[in-house]
Amino acid sequence: MLYPQAKIVAGYDDIMPTFKGLLTEDGLLKVIEYVKSMGPKNGSESSATPAPTETSATPVASQPGTPRQTKTGPQAGSAPGVR
């Protein structure tokens, strides 16, 4: 979050903004704890597998009371991060 430009995956654009100077050390630790709290409980490991890559625009199911969103995947012949 502080240095997102430190590791950019080949083929992807450097688009993530830095949060350096916007979060205190205490604030950063709270964000880390929040993210950890969203993971598996009681030391169990997640058996989640990566989602398959989409090849066309697909509606994304939304929760009740939220607007419907559209998820898009890479187009044929395109590289990640290329627009």
Image (cartoon, rainbow, N blue to C red):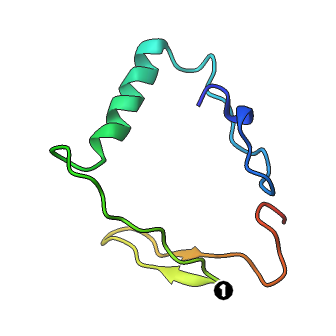
Q: Secondary structure at mark 1?
A: loop
Residue 26: give x, y in percent of width and height: 41, 14
Q: Nearer the viewer, residue 3 or 10?
A: 10
Up-down: is 56 above or below 48? below
Circle 1 residue: 56
Q: Nearer the viewer, residue 20 or 10?
A: 10
Up-down: is 14 above or below 74? above
Residue 80: give x, y in percent of width and height: 76, 65
**Amino acid on which disc 1 is placed:** Ser
Q: How many marks?
A: 1
Residue at image x 58%, y 74%? 71
The C terminus - image quarter: bottom right
Residue 60: give x, y in percent of width and height: 48, 77
Up-down: is 41 above or below 64? above
| Left or right placement of residue 17 versus residue 68 in this view | right
Q: Are there few (<14), some (14-19), or many (20+) residues within 10 Å of tag 1?
A: few
Q: Nearer the viewer, residue 45 or 67?
A: 45
Query: Splitting the image into 4 quarters, where does residue 76 fall?
Result: bottom right
Residue at image x 40%, y 22%? 29
Q: Residue furthest left?
A: 42
Residue at image x 74%, y 44%? 8
The N terminus - image quarter: top right
Residue 11: give x, y in percent of width and height: 81, 57
